[in-house]
Amino acid sequence: MVLNESTMIPVSAASVIVDKDSSAFQSDSGGFVLIDSLAPGEYTLAIQAENYYFETRNIIIQNGSTTCDTIFLNRIVTNSDYFFDYIFFSERSSAFISSEANNKTINTIEQLLKNEQDLTIVIFGYSDKNECASADTTLAYQRATVVRDMLVMKTIDAKRLTIRTAAQSNDSPADQRAAGGPDFNYRVEFVIKKQ
């Protein structure tokens, strides 16, 4: 299975190439790749997908057995504005972050900003059509602010973090819904900019 390292969303159309015979396979919409008819032995897989960093994986095929593995790919940052990732809030009308996956996303962005000093991030806060319409902009702002403050606590300069609110303007992301994720809009998303 091929997944986005940060979001855990399946990566479709990823190419998986087997080193010994250069046979190529592709992940489906759920991120699954079936590689059959390999003789027992050790193989190196090369995994690549558009807008993701190249990855390799060593696997050992035992005689008469099935080997399952999960491969994580990281998104590439380009010279232009680039959508990076989501953080989802599990509770309606809440700006509380609790999920381990969300904390992993925060840590990934922290490392990205520390490694790439010319990057800035725009944090877009959203709310859902099922949340109070009169408070949706405030809630969206609170969600973005919570995320910004977490990054500042990790010693990221607040000048590199900009907050924007989109409130109820966008539906929950199509790739998230297609992957069987929640159909709600309690989220923030990150857009990376190069200075």
Image (tube, rainbow, N blue to C red):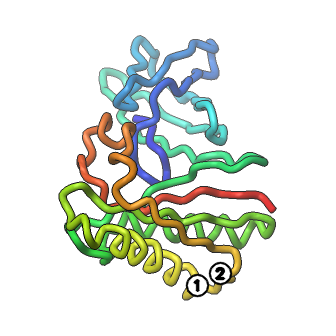
**Image quadrant in which you'd find residue 194:** bottom right
Question: What amino acid is labelled 2 in the image?
Answer: Ile
Marks 2/1 in contact by CB < 8 Å: the verdict is: yes
Describe residue 108's horizontal placement relative to residue 11 as left or right: right
Q: Secondary structure at mark 2?
A: loop
Q: 140 and 120: which one is in front?
A: 140
Describe residue 38's horizontal placement relative to residue 154 as left or right: left
Distance between the Cα atoms at labels 2 and 1?
5 Å
- Dot 2, crowdedness within 10 Å: few (<14), some or many (≥20)? some
The residue beneath circle 2 is 156
Q: Secondary structure at mark 1?
A: helix
Q: Quadrant of the C terminus?
A: bottom right
Please provide percent x and percent y for residue 189: 48, 58
Q: 73 and 56: which one is in front?
A: 73
Please provide percent x and percent y for residue 181: 27, 45
**Image quadrant in which you'd find residue 191:** bottom right
The disc label shown at residue 152, or none: 1
**Image quadrant in which you'd find residue 22:** top right
